Image (spheres, grey):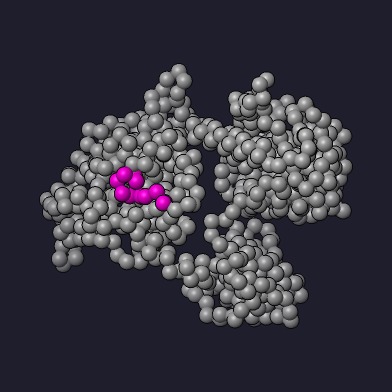
Amino acid sequence: MDLQEVFLQLSPRLSVRADTRSSEGKWLHKYTERSLPTKPLRRPYAVYLSSAFGGYRWLCFDLDDKRGDVGPDLATLLRWLEEAGLTYVLAASGSAGGRHVWVAAEALLTATLVEAIAVAAAKRLPTLDYGLLKSRTGAVRPIGAPHRNGRRSELMSPPDARRAAALLTPATCGNGSEAFTRLLLIIGAVPAREDIRPRTAARGDDARVLDDELGPRLAGTPNTLLDADTMALLTRRPAADRVSEVCASILTKLALRRWTLPMVARLLGDQRYRQGGLLHLTTAPGVGPLRVLLDTSDAAAKLERQWARCVAYAAKLPVLDENPEWTETIDAVVDQVARVQQAADACPERWATESGPADRAALDLHCLLALRSGRTRINLDIRRAALATGYGRSTMHRALARLALDHWTATADDDGPAGTYDLLPVNEQHPAFTHVARGGTQGNPPPQGAPRSPLTSLLQTRLAAGQADVFSHGRATPTHSGGLGHHAGRIYQQLAEHGGRPLSLAEVCARTGYAPRTCTRHLGRMQQLLVATRAVMTVHHECPTCQAAPGDRCRTAAGTVVRRRGADQHAARRTLTAQRSGTPHYRPRPGSLVAAARALGAHGRLAARARRYAIEAELYHWWRQEEAWMRAPKKGVRTGVQTHPDQAALVLTTLPTQPRRRYPRGPDGRADHAAARARIERRIATA
């Protein structure tokens, strides 16, 4: 059965939205309206979720992998749907890692209820793209429809297409309106995720949005002086696929500077800006890269809509530059992190021990979180640290303890939450400086005011390389899929950090602290799996004599090309070529990490670990809720609403919170943790 035909037959409107091609034959990701076809289209297209009057026939939760890790959010969403008694269909969206969760309704749902569900879920699911559930024109590609990258949306659960068609049909899905109200209550009972950085609370009165004769704007005095980046965006014509993105960025920057609508409207009087960053306000999409010029009235109306939206968005943004505490402390934090990293690089043999890669990964993660939060005191959960570094929770626990013993970090001694560590400053008494005396790289302290962005990018690249499944620990056994090991991963991290140029074997040994024999063995295994390749360094080199650039011929002092005995190079350049041709150089191949992990049988280890940790966290929170309920005062026996697996579904439209789930207990009345874990494992999807 073709599920595309099911969507077309049940479409709430007599039209669909289809993608258009460019003159080069590429999909523009620009959907236009067209009549409802009788057969599925062979191009990317989307069906509407609601009717023209606003009633929703389907809810589609779009989890986008570009926003983060989809796995935990998918497990949480499916648990909510099952607790609410809703049936669903799970599909791969066509993009790498994206998921679509389709939920049909027996009767059309009101737009107010759907928007409330979308907003509540978005506050708790970072990867949820909830815009299509708030818009009257929200449309999604049906299951089986092609994607612009060549893939298709594929059915995942249930695997039977006929069963999926029944769950997508309003008459047979079994999802009443009261179940969606129950879903909203269940989502609202879960605390929303907290942001790391302060938001509108740091603004005070400046967060207020004024709406008067000057239009919507942020309260405060306008700052008319524009920086070089904003002027560059204003004066340069954006790419054809980034016209709206650049315009939104400019309007948000102007809103943060307290500009008003008439001030922005005066910018449209300059042709440089109309044809530059504000091109989206005066034109509409045309055929291919061409734009259709709008009338003056249409352009003014479009400016008002876009400006109001960007002002509302700017009011919710964190204001780090205006926060005195952040401004005063971030420079000190960046300088301390730079010193710690330089001291760690000065003693590579410290991280070349058996536990060294785990210790360095824990230190890098602490430094990265310090740069992101602007403070050196970090609350680091061992499971979160394990998933961020690619190690197990026990390994991370021991690594954090070893860092504290070596005075890289210290456990906070206050009454705060557990797992709180302080990043200690590096001075001349630090153990790392004992290696500097033997000729390390820590001879000079790092400069004051070290840049924050390069440090953050470096640490992110390093930790991302260590998360690859191909570098998992251990050899393959009947119960364990082995990888290349974390020592090989540490060597690959150095190659990835210097991806712009290949590293010689001597440089790899100096940066990692391993012996040449060890580096050669790990690099040889990575070469066999095409994770790293040996670079050829024998063709183009700079000339030490005449300073000729690589690829240029050597020239004499008079400027003529060297022609000496048939050679067009100086002797020093030929000697350099001979030396480099005998020295092996290596470069990384990031695109082969997944294929290498599949070849070793280690693919999916990090995902399985994330699922196991999610189960453990869910089990812990469930037991804590049970303990809180047992200690709570009770006026009578069995008061309150309780549920069990065999109980019929309740209509919870009048309940302020979700019902308490009974914790499994044995015949003797004691808690049965094994049964609770098995129940959570059945509820969390394996996808």
Q: Residue at x 29, y 41 (%)?
A: 351
Tell me where residue 214 sits by quadrant: bottom right
Q: Is residue 521 above or below residue 119?
A: above
Q: Is residue 20 magenta?
A: no
Q: Residue at x 17, y 61 (%)?
A: 546
The boundaries of the magenta stretch are: 403-413
Expressed as whole percent of the image width and height from the top left, the position of residue 599 reads: 45, 27
- In front: 240, or 605? 605
Expressed as whole percent of the image width and height from the top left, the position of residue 52 reads: 85, 53
Q: Is residue 411 magenta?
A: yes
- In front: 549, or 508? 508
Q: Is residue 229 above or below residue 487?
A: below
Q: Would residue 233 be found to the left or right of residue 141 on screen?
A: left
Total marks in image = 0
Q: Is residue 335 above or below residue 366?
A: below
Q: Residue at x 63, y 26 (%)?
A: 670
Q: Would residue 452 be found to the left or right of residue 70 on screen?
A: left
Say whether residue 68 is visible.
yes
- In front: 143, or 658? 658
Instruction: Identify the residue at the far top of this view.
Output: 478
Q: Quadrant of the C terminus?
A: top right
Expressed as whole percent of the image width and height from the top left, the position of residue 156 reads: 67, 31
